[in-house]
Image (tube, grey):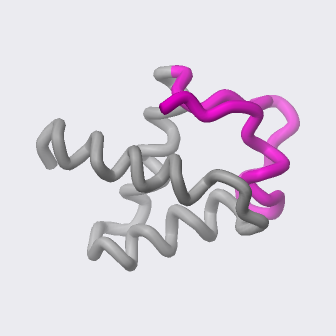
Amino acid sequence: MNVGDFQSLAKILKLKLQGTELSITQITTALDVEHHLEGGSFLSIFKHLIARKEIVMDMLNTNISSCSSAKLIQRIIH
């Protein structure tokens, strides 16, 4: 995956995360399937965006598999 592909996929993920009641795990899994990527690819992108502070969330009180992304994510920087 080149940098341009990565940035495009990151943008898709950021858009999907906004205002949804789906969990982060549900969103990233669905995007992996939709884009025919290896399982965990969008989860890796999600982790990268957290590390780069493009997604801000409370890491101590977070369960990405059961809470909706709208409740977990405090801010998404575009």
Rendering coords of residue 63 (x, y %): 79, 50
Residue at 51% in and 70% down: 29
Q: Is residue 17 above or below residue 46?
A: below
Q: Is residue 48 magenta?
A: no
Residue at 79% in and 59% down: 68
Q: Is residue 19 above or below residue 39?
A: above
Q: Quadrant of residue 23?
A: bottom right
Q: Is residue 74 left or right of residue 36?
A: right
Q: Is residue 9 left or right of residue 70?
A: left
Q: Quadrant of residue 17?
A: bottom right
Q: Is residue 78 left or right of residue 67?
A: left
Rendering coords of residue 34 (x, y %): 37, 77
Rendering coords of residue 32 (x, y %): 39, 69
Rendering coords of residue 30 (x, y %): 50, 74
Q: Is residue 50 above or below residue 33?
A: above
- The magenta region covers 53-78
| Total numbered labels placed on residues in the image | 0
Residue at 73% in and 53% down: 69
Q: Is residue 59 magenta?
A: yes
Q: Which of these two is toward me, 20 or 53?
A: 20
The residue positioned farthest toward the left in the image shown = 2
Residue at 79% in and 30% down: 58
